[in-house]
Image (cartoon, helix red, strand yellow):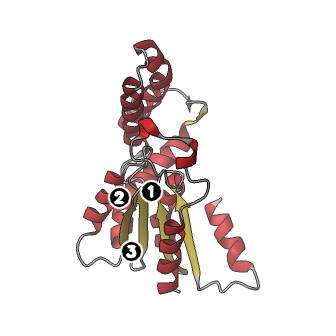
Amino acid sequence: DVEGGLAFLAEQPEVDPQRLFFLGHSKGATYAPRLLTDHANVRAGVMLAGPFRGIDAMLRAQAEKLREVMEATGASEAQIAEVVGPILATAADLEALRAGTYELPTLDGLPVAYWESWLRLGDQAPALAAALDRPLLVLSGDYDWNVPPSETEAWAARFGEGSIHRTAILPCVTHALNCIAQPDWRRIRASDIGAHVDPRVIEAVVEFLLAHR
């Protein structure tokens, strides 16, 4: 789908095929290093809330965060197990798939090949990104519970000093890229939750893209 979208865009008469950019969110962000590696006409990429670790590690981390939140709100162990258990089961299956010990044709209702592709994509992304000769922007928020800011910090560490790539973590921004104004999640009201993508996200992306047009 990503390849098809890129090809379609390049064929449009109003589009300069040598001035293409790629922007992906969450899992979609993981495609950026591979796409820029394979297509020299993609001039830069933006990874919004892009995980550094593989999907198996991310699912386990998300389950642990969910357990923490449910415990803090007084959920019973049975309630926690009902919600967190399936996520941990999928993470365990993915770990078995990575180890070569998973034997079923599907995993969580999807073909094993789908998950193998996702694992491979995530595993390749850090090295591919570090080797790129065109820039990436890795942008996330410190209120993201799905892909925590430590993932963006890991990207920054992988790139190192003097890299052409840029990373940024925006305060109050969530995985949905909106802002929650109340820092204490136990006290959030509906009025604290931004209804749109935070303007700072848009500004950072536009500034980055304009710099590399």
Q: Report whether residue 200 is seen.
A: yes
Between disc 1 and disc 2, whose residue precedes?
1
Q: Which residue is mark 3?
A: 132
The amino acid marked with disc number 3 is: Leu
Tell me the kind of residue under disc 2.
Answer: Thr
Residue type, mark 1 in image: Gly
In screen coordinates, is 69 left or right of 158?
Answer: right
Q: CA distance from mark 2 to mark 3?
A: 17 Å
User: Residue farthest to the right?
Assistant: 13
Label 2 SS = helix
Q: Picture coordinates of residue 102 (x, y %)?
A: 44, 29
In this view, the residue in front, 85 or 134, is 85
Please tell me which residue lies in front, 6 or 181.
Answer: 181
Residue of label 1 = 50
Asked whether the beta carbons under mark 1 and mark 2 sit within 8 Å of each other, the answer is: yes
Q: Is residue 158 left or right of residue 104?
A: left
Q: CA distance from mark 1 to mark 2?
A: 7 Å
